[in-house]
């Protein structure tokens, strides 16, 4: 069974003991309600490190006032079993009061990147993410930390924070794990009613359509428009936050083909009923 650390101090002592034994440490930060996407990160961390810590913490600072913090799924017992099966040695599971004791007043913000894309629709979200990830990295001191490309903007922001603040250890991006119909696995998929679940696959279909259009010579804006048309046509009452074709590093809108061979990412966020879904695909143009 995995060891459970419940405070930053307990986590720090465990990691220190491992380091003194010469063990390398991999960290997989999560909010729990774990699925095969999380398992793929844990398995990779277990292949590449002597010891693996999975943090499970539903971080209030990354939820807006009208978002789903209170109803976000919490399933610690089954999460812990999944962590053990996937090869984790410890679960770091602090309570909110242990992470943010009274008087907590520090935040970390990666400027610019945090305001784009999802940041424009979820003010303060990436500041909450960067703050908690820095705290997790400080408590564990990992050699490598693993993040999914599912949250592509988050991955770019964490890499930027790690570079800017000279954080030791590597930030490793991992591929998106999907259902057979293309829907990216997400803890939030369980909110979807059966009909919404069927429609949700069209999000990935729309992104694939955009990539196909780009490869056929369409401009980034044309590709975005074709993906949006597909979404509106195939999902009744969908609300589209954005579909954006961006430079994979800067996350700024991709330009015309004179910038050929740049790495491009097509990202989208939509709302089906009360559920917000995100997805993205890589390409080049
Ligand atoms: P979360 O618990 O949603 O905060 O996710 C924790 C980590 O798992 C993040 O780095 C996510 O990007 C990653 N993750 C979530 N879903 C997937 C997926 N379908 N495939 C790969 N990684 C994922």
Image: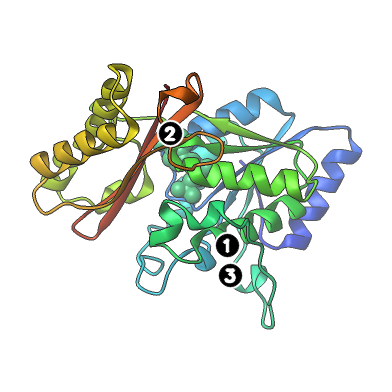
Label whose residue precedes the other's in the sequence (2 or 1): 1
**Could you give the CA–CA distance between mark 3 and mark 2, rounded to whole angstroms?**
43 Å
Residue at 70%, 63% in the rendered image: 7
SS at circle 1: helix
**Could you give the CA–CA distance between mark 3 and mark 1, rounded to whole angstroms?**
17 Å
- For disc 2, the neighbor class at 10 Å (few under 14, some 14 to 19, many from 20) is some
SS at circle 3: helix
**Could you give the CA–CA distance between mark 2 and mark 1, rounded to whole angstroms?**
28 Å
Q: Quadrant of the N terminus?
A: top right
Comparing 29 with 4, the one in front is 29
Is residue 200 visible in the rendered image? The answer is yes
Label whose residue precedes the other's in the sequence (3 or 2): 3
How far from the left and from the top, in percent, is residue 230?
Answer: 15, 36
Question: Residue 87's quadrant in the figure?
Answer: top right
Is residue 36 visible in the rendered image? The answer is no
- For disc 1, the neighbor class at 10 Å (few under 14, some 14 to 19, many from 20) is many
**What label sits on residue 176 in the rendered view?**
none
Q: How is the image coloured?
A: rainbow
How far from the left and from the top, in percent, is residue 61?
Answer: 53, 67
Query: Which residue, given by chain and number where applicable, does mark 3 sit on?
Result: 96
Residue at 62%, 74% in the rendered image: 97
Residue labelled 2 has its Cβ within 8 Å of some atom of ligand 1: no
Residue at 49%, 25% in the rendered image: 259
Comparing 260 with 19, the one in front is 260
Query: Which residue, given by chain and number where applicable, does mark 2 sit on?
Result: 255
- Above/below status of 197 relative to 214: below
Residue labelled 3 has its Cβ within 8 Å of some atom of ligand 1: no
Q: Is residue 166 left or right of residue 88?
A: right
SS at circle 2: loop
Comparing 283 with 279, the one in front is 283
**What label sits on residue 127 in the rendered view?**
1
């Amino acid at each position: 069974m995995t060891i459970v650390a419940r405070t930053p101090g307990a986590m720090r002592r465990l990691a220190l003991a491992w380091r003194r034994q010469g063990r390398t440490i991999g960290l997989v930060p999560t909010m729990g309600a774990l699925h095969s996407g999380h398992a793929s990160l844990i398995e990779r961390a277990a292949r590449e490190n002597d010891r693996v810590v999975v943090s499970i913490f539903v971080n209030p600072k990354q939820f807006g006032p009208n978002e789903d913090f209170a109803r976000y799924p919490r399933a610690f017992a089954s999460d812990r079993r999944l962590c053990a099966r996937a090869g984790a040695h410890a679960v770091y599971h602090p309570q909110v009061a242990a992470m943010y004791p009274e008087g907590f007043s520090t935040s970390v913000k990666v400027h610019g990147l945090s305001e784009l894309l999802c940041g424009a629709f979820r003010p303060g979200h990436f500041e909450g993410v960067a703050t908690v990830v820095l705290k997790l990295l400080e408590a564990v001191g990992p050699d490598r930390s693993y993040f999914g490309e599912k949250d592509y903007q988050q991955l770019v922001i964490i890499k930027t924070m790690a570079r800017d603040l000279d954080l030791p250890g590597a930030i490793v991006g991992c591929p998106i794990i999907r259902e057979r119909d293309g829907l990216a696995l997400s803890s939030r998929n369980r909110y979807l009613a059966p009909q919404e679940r069927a429609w949700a696959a069209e999000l990935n279909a729309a992104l694939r359509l955009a990539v196909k259009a780009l490869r056929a010579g369409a401009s980034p804006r044309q590709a975005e428009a074709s993906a949006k048309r597909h979404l509106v046509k195939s999902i009744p009452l969908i609300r589209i936050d954005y579909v954006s074709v961006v430079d994979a590093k800067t996350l700024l809108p991709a330009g015309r083909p004179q910038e050929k061979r740049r790495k491009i990412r097509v990202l989208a966020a939509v709302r089906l009923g009360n559920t917000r879904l995100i997805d993205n695909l890589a390409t080049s143009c």
